[in-house]
Amino acid sequence: MDDKILALFQLCDSNFPTGAFSHSYGLESYIQEETVHNVETFSQWLQVFIQEQLLNSDGLACHLVYQALEDEDFQKVWKLDRMLTVQNLPRETREGSMRMGERMLELVQSLYEIPALLPYRKRITEKQSFGHPAIVFTMVAHNLGVSKSTTVLFYLYSVVSSLVQNAVRGIPLGQTAGQKIIREIQPVLVDAATAIGQLGEEDFGIVSPGIELSQMRHERVNIRIFMS
Amino acid sequence: MEQWTGVLHLNAEDRKGKTVAKNVYYQGAFKVMRPIYHDDSGRACYYLLNPGGGYLDGDRYQMKIGLGENAKLTLTTQGATKVYKTPNRFAYQESEISLQAGSYLEYFPDPLIAYQNAHYKQKNVIKMHPSATLLYSDIITPGWSPEGERFSYKSVQLLNEIYMDGELVVYDHLHLKPALQNIRGLGFMEGYTHLGSMFVVCKQMNPSFLDQLYSLLDKNTLDYKVGLSLLPVSGFTARVFANTTQVIERIFSEIHRHISHEWFQTKQYSLRKY
């Protein structure tokens, strides 16, 4: 099992070039408005982001996509790809996720031969699907034989670790402070992954209005280091 | 099959430039008044009524609205939607809206006021032709309690789904649970008390229109905060935070005025309420 986990680690690495380093998911709007300016305020923001957006969208999608792959129900996977995209109302985060999904898909196709990736890529090329990193990640994890709960937890971790690196650059925070945040957020991620296990499709896509509004307002941030 | 507390079905069609009801059916605690024609555009305006005055424990409402080709309709309520406390079962409203080619629907319900311990769920499903136009808005207030305490409701859940050519194109899901969330805080309402949402789907939308709206609305003020973004189909969404219903209504009215003027060369009329 160790070799499977190690293989999934590669995708969680914040150096894995999917473009996640250029997306702040609206954090930059808070930084510019100075409501997020230190470790404390960032940790507060991160917790809301995880519990009120990441959990109900990307996190729940991992869970549902994994289930659909178990059932070999690809129509369900394509449906979730669409739901993930159209529930993402702020244009920058929506288009950012599509780009990251496509980039990740290309990358993992050069690393693995996974049957599910082929029709997904074809659908994206033909504009029938949009592309999302949560789906690509789950396809790889499922193919590796990693469990569903580990897949969800590792995906949440991958998003959060990139986001903390971005906060370290953007706010800015010290490198040690960043690592401390990643350490302290781990129980929150474990709880989120457990909570996701109890959710169903009817819970999908619930967003926190503040985080979403800040993602929309990011389009108007003039001097920026992030694309969303 | 569970019973509905109130049912309303309304189908409207265009007859020589004037929109008229093809059939109207209502039952129980849901009613619609005779249409009003505010101008000579042929657009019919219907006011929805809840004769019971508010939603009670376990109430279930169903609305089905259909617009035929080129029909034009404004739909609004006569007053705020009040949801009283629901000790046993949540109150529920679902709406199914179907818009055929070239049709135009404005659906602007009054704000939602959820009382102390109220649990409310609402689902709107809109199926539209790519050439149809939809303008929709809703406003969630911090509710009401006898002690004047805000956010004392238990749960407010609003779901909007828009389909075009059978494909889901917009999915909007809010679920406010004040007892479990730091609702006034960072990431939620950011210190504000009222939340407004607007969806506009229209083939005439273009990115520069969004720039115009931003310069019109995005003032340096503490009274409100507005976010606008393009949808994956031709259209946009707006979210507004404020501390009163009136401020959000003013912003939505401004957007409505701009759309009427720029896209339809018509003057906006006010929805007079008595």
Image (cartoon, rainbow, N blue to C red):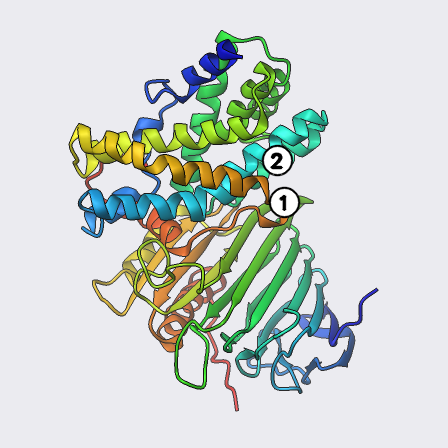
The percent position of residue B264, horizontal first and vertical second, equals: 50, 63
Relative to the observer, which residue lies in front, B200 or A64?
Answer: A64
Residue B141 sits in which quadrant?
bottom left
Residue B57 sits in which quadrant?
bottom right
The percent position of residue A99, horizontal first and vertical second, equals: 43, 27
Q: Which residue is mark 2?
A: A64
Question: How far, Cα to Cα, is label 1 from label 2?
Answer: 8 Å
Disc assigned to residue A201: 1
Relative to the observer, which residue lies in front, B19 or B270?
Answer: B270
Which residue is drawn at the image coordinates 46% and 41% (left, top)?
A191
Q: Could you tell me which quadrant the N terminus of chain A lies in?
A: top right
Element marked by disc 2: helix
Total numbered labels placed on residues in the image: 2
Q: In the rendered structure, the residue with mark 2 lies on which chain?
A: A
Amino acid type, residue under disc 2 in the picture: Leu
The residue furthest bottom is B274
The percent position of residue A161, horizontal first and vertical second, equals: 33, 29
Which residue is drawn at the image coordinates 34% and 63% (left, top)?
B184
The percent position of residue B241, horizontal first and vertical second, equals: 35, 64
Q: In the rendered structure, the residue with mark 1 lies on which chain?
A: A
Amino acid type, residue under disc 1 in the picture: Glu
Element marked by disc 1: helix
Which residue is drawn at the image coordinates 57% and 80% (left, top)?
B84
Q: Using the rendered image of the protein, determine whether residue B173 is visible from the camera's viewpoint.
A: yes
